[in-house]
Image: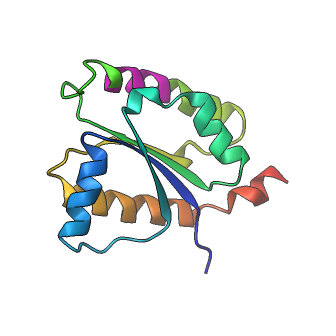
Amino acid sequence: MYEPKIIGFLCNWCSYRGADTAGMARMKYPPNVKIIRVPCSGRISPELVLRCFREGADGVMVLGCHIGDCHYANGNHRTAKRMAILRQLLEYNGIEAQRLCVDWVSAAEGEKFATLIASFTEQVRQLAPFVEIMQ
């Protein structure tokens, strides 16, 4: 069975701690996501996401603090704007927008984190491996 390679950019203050909460509660979720801890989801540029796809990722997740709860005031607002435009750019370049997941997970939402990982992994699994699309 095809197992997708997924890169997950998680903000240090909320999403990464949500992942930690899921781990401490021993919640089960697929091990497909390689987590990269970043100071803020607002630091994730569209170029970085495109680079992940170019280097073999089948899916990319950008998880940040809930809107209005950013520790850097407006980083997640920047993320929401950038990623909406990036979805259009992905479609224009022949990459399914379903390969990108942008969501907001707080430190207390370990269950939401685990559910999100499982559902996104299954969503990407339903698509063809990204390498096949590029050929």
Is residue 78 magenta-colored?
Answer: yes
**Please, which residue is most extreme toward the right here?**
135
Residue 120, horizontal then vertical, whole percent: 43, 58
Q: Is residue 77 left or right of residue 126?
A: left
Task: Identify the residue at image location x=63%, y=45%.
Answer: 52
- Which quadrant holds residue 41? top left
> How was this image coloured?
rainbow
| Residue in the foreground of this view, choosing between 107 and 83 | 107
Q: Quick check: 88 above or below 5? A: above
Q: Is residue 31 left or right of residue 12?
A: right
Q: Quick check: 121 above or below 59? A: below
Task: Identify the residue at image location x=72%, y=35%.
Answer: 93
Is residue 59 magenta-colored?
Answer: no
- Which quadrant holds residue 42? top left
Q: Is residue 133 left or right of residue 107?
A: right
Q: Quick check: 110 above or below 103? A: below
Residue 26, horizontal then vertical, whole percent: 22, 74
Q: Quadrant of the C terminus?
A: bottom right
Q: Which residues are magenta?
A: 76-84
Task: Identify the residue at image location x=25%, y=39%.
Answer: 13
**Please, which residue is most extreme toward the bottom here?**
1
Task: Identify the residue at image location x=20%, y=44%.
Answer: 106
Count of labels in the image = 0
Q: Main secondary structure of the magenta part?
A: helix
Q: Is residue 61 left or right of residue 50?
A: left
Q: Quadrant of the N terminus?
A: bottom right
